[in-house]
Image (tube, helix red, strand yellow):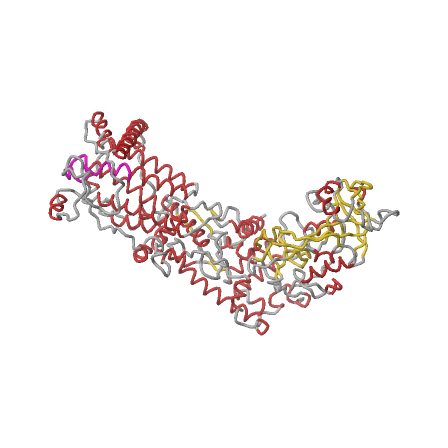
């Protein structure tokens, strides 16, 4: 062969032949050796083979031998390695010396409701990969799993077959607690089937008295620091759930259709010669009964427009006139009769037609000429910007919507109607009847929905508690510390049930007990994000206040849906206390359990085991939305089979290789073996950088490249002749075995954080080769590299040789096709 001839001229030592054979299959069969066996390389074997002759020849070869199974049979084999790489390993690492290096990953608690889905797998396995990598780097790791056990979904599940009106709060809480605890045990079992490393015996639950006491103390510290206040202001409200929602509890749909309207609001202080109406546009006609102002922009120019056929002139922003012209010209010819600066409109008054009250035009910083008419309908009970503007001008808000999303008596003729359903139509009909409706059309836009009920929400003013992270409230809080600490102590002893079971006098500290009649217990529900967001207080060394002189954890890793929820709550409570995607409803989900155990039809959905699930997680670009399909899983499983067959081949080649007796010094290795160690060094360095950056998809990509391009397609094919046919004690054979030993030693440690079961299995079957066998691969440390392996000159030479080899085989293939 060309490469062999070049190598033999350059290197007098024996160089393995580089053959055109395909990469090694998962079967360890005899390979025809060029120049050593009968010339059968290009001859088809007869259908009826003489097995006795084959055996006669195969007995002359040193073929790979190993008991390492060809097939994973992961469902049965994974549990055999689970304890050694989870519970036993976690206990071992807590007692070993780590030179003071500790790594804490804080677990954002999953919700204790329902089966685990692929989002859970992505979350927990990514954390586990980080922890296992840090463990291999010599850190003592801290990871305590937890569960979020409070919230409306659990309560709804608990009441699914019950009449809520016949149950007391304590009975409802007991039912919810039972549901949560059942879900915790079920989810814990599934998490552990993925071989998640952690302190499972000390898992934290947000419903335990200790946790609730810590939460109250964190809240109290925030109150003491004047970060908590109560205010009547608009919040997202879910009529379907009858509860306020945090930003993180919203899902936005871009296909929501609203009935948008253009409405006349008659001005009362504009012109004595002609009537003028402010033209406003809104996508929420149901908020018009709550209108208390119109907002304009000081720096915008406005035009008084006469439209043929209309009884009054219209006031619109000049920048919006061209966009509005088609709408206005449907009524008749359009003419601008006068212009006026926005700042000159401030203070003008208009008549609110539904309530018949007189309201004012105000300047609003939020008003632009990008949409609408340049005049913004303002209802402070139903919009954040509206609320802020009216609060600046001491304008009282009007809330005429109840908890069920229906108009109250304050809405006059619309009382009792659902604002999102018939109420909207009733308001539009009333405007049309009174000659105030210029136009109506459907408008498709992005709109918030309740993440639980999947129904649209509204903005509605209610009394709520808020965390103010920008302003310091001026009113001093009296005796906060003693009251909060007393309530926290009560929670620690009796749990939060005490809030319902004990009297007001018992809930107050002794110094306030005598005045108990002046106090009443609040029945507001603490936000679930605050509930789980104070879980950092459960971390080691952060159990008491004062809080967080140093960061509580090294890593928070959660899904993008957590950014405004758990991440933000954790950050604010800790720092401020001290100072077509997959969908159940669509039915296109793939459960982690299906990947591990297989589906009903094992041919279509085979049981891949947890390592394939873990490898899929590692291969994803998890900083973006992740896609999943059965085809993707099958591709990942194929990579897994390749890793396994590669490891099996190397283990077979190390049969009867004793490291202490047979290891060849680096300087005595054949050049191709030295070159492979150079490539191994580069591979290991790249892998380490990727692990350090938590870029696990790059780890998988580099692992696949090294496995296929460097090992299977090149090195393994190059060394088979001397491995199979050279004398067992020859330098050439021992040189290859020494190189394979170094490769598999690095290979299994690279695999370990991701495919921990496969790595443990490799460790077990290679223990006879190691001078000091270990109980777990994770006790072996990170990649054992030697600086002298890195050889740039050797790389340049072999790059040239491999280039020539590739060109030669292209010519051979071309000749074969034209023969």
Q: Is residue 644 magenta?
A: no
- Relative image position of residue 271 (x, y in whole percent): 86, 47
Direction from residue 395 to residue 197 in the image, left or right? left
Residue at the spot 59% in from the left edge and 47% down from the top edge: 579
How many numbered badges does the structure rendering display?
0
Magenta span: chief secondary structure: helix
In the visual, does 531 lie left or right of 696? right
The span shown in magenta is: 712-732
Q: Report x, y in % for residue 725.
A: 16, 38
Q: For this view, does 721 lie left or right of residue 489?
A: left
Q: Position of residue 146 (x, y in %)?
A: 46, 57
Residue 15 spot, x, y in % from top left: 21, 31
Q: Quadrant of residue 790?
A: top left
Front-most of 708 and 733? 708
Residue furthest out toward the bottom: 166
- Quadrant including the C terminus: top left
């Amino acid at each position: 062969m060309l490469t062999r001839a070049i190598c033999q001229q350059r290197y007098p030592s024996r160089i393995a032949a580089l053959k055109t054979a395909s990469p090694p299959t998962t079967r360890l069969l005899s390979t025809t050796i060029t120049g050593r066996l009968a010339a059968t390389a290009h001859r088809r074997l007869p259908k009826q083979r003489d097995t006795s002759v084959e055996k006669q020849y195969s007995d002359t070869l040193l073929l790979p031998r190993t008991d390492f199974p060809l097939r994973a049979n992961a469902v049965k084999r994974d549990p055999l390695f689970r304890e050694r790489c989870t519970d036993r390993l976690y206990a071992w690492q807590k007692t070993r010396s780590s030179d003071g290096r500790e790594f804490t990953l804080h677990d954002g608690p999953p919700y204790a409701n329902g089966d685990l889905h692929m989002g859970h797998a992505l979350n927990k396995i990514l954390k586990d990969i980080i922890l296992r990598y840090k463990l291999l780097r010599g850190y003592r790791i801290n990871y305590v799993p937890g569960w979020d056990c409070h919230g409306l979904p659990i309560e709804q599940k608990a009441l699914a077959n019950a009449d809520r009106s016949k149950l007391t709060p304590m009975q409802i809480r007991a039912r919810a607690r039972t549901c949560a605890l059942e879900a915790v045990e079920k989810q814990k079992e599934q998490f552990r089937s993925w071989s998640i490393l952690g302190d499972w015996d000390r898992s934290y639950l947000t419903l335990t008295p200790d946790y609730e006491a810590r939460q109250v103390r964190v809240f109290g510290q925030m109150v003491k620091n004047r970060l908590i206040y109560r205010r009547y202001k608009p919040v997202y409200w879910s009529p379907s759930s009858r509860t306020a929602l945090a930003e993180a509890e919203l899902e936005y749909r871009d296909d929501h259709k609203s009935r948008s309207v253009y409405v006349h609001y008659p001005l009362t202080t504009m012109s004595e010669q002609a009537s003028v109406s402010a033209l406003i546009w809104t996508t929420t006609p149901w908020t018009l009964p709550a209108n208390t102002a119109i907002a304009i922009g000081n720096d915008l120019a406005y035009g008084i427009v006469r439209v043929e056929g209309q009884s009054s002139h219209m006031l619109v922003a000049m920048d919006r006139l061209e966009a509005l012209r088609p709408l206005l010209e449907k009524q008749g010819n359009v003419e601008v009769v006068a212009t006026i600066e926005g700042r000159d409109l401030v203070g003008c008054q208009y008549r609110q037609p539904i309530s018949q009250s007189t309201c004012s035009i105000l300047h609003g910083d939020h008003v632009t000429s990008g949409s609408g008419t340049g005049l913004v309908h303002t209802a402070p009970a139903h919009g954040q910007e509206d609320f802020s503007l009216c609060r600046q001008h001491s304008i009282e808000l009007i809330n005429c919507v109840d908890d069920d999303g229906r108009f109250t008596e304050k809405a006059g003729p619309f009382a009792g109607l659902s604002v999102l359903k018939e109420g909207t139509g009733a308001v539009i009909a009333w405007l049309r009847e009174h000659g105030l409706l210029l136009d109506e059309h459907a408008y498709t836009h992005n709109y918030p929905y309740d993440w639980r009920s999947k129904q649209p929400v509204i903005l509605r003013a209610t009394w709520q508690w808020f965390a103010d992270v920008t302003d310091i409230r001026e009113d001093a809080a009296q005796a906060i510390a003693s009251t909060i600490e007393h309530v926290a102590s009560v929670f620690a002893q009796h749990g939060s049930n005490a809030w319902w079971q004990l009297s007001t006098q018992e809930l107050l500290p002794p110094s306030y007990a005598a005045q108990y009649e002046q106090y009443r217990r609040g029945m507001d529900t603490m936000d679930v994000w605050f509930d789980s967001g104070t879980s950092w207080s459960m971390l080691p060394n952060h159990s008491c206040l004062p809080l967080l002189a140093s960061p509580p954890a090294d890593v928070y890793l959660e899904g993008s849906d957590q950014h405004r929820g758990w991440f933000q709550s954790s950050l604010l409570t800790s720092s401020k206390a001290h100072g077509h995607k997959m969908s159940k409803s669509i039915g296109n989900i793939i459960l982690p359990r299906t990947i591990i155990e297989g589906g009903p039809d094992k041919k279509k959905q085979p049981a891949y085991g947890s390592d394939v699930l873990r490898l899929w997680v590692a291969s994803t670009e998890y900083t973006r939305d992740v896609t999943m399909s059965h085809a993707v899983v099958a591709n990942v499983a194929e990579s897994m089979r390749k890793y396994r067959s590669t490891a099996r081949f190397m283990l077979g080649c190390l049969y009867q290789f004793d490291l202490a007796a047979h290891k060849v010094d680096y300087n005595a290795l054949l050049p191709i073996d030295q070159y492979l160690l150079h490539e191994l060094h580069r591979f290991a360095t790249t892998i380490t950088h990727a692990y350090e950056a938590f870029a696990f998809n790059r780890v998988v990509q580099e692992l696949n490249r090294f496995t296929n391009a460097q090992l299977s397609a090149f090195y393994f094919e190059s060394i088979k002749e001397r491995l199979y046919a050279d004398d067992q004690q020859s330098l050439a054979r021992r040189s290859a075995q020494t190189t394979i030993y170094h490769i598999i030693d690095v290979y299994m440690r690279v695999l370990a954080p991701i495919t921990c079961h496969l790595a443990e299995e490799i460790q077990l079957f290679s223990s006879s080769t190691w001078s000091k066998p270990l109980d777990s691969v994770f006790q072996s440390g990170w990649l054992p590299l030697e600086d002298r392996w890195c050889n740039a000159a050797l790389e340049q030479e072999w790059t040239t040789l491999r280039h020539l080899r590739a060109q030669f085989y292209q010519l051979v293939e071309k000749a074969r096709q034209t023969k």
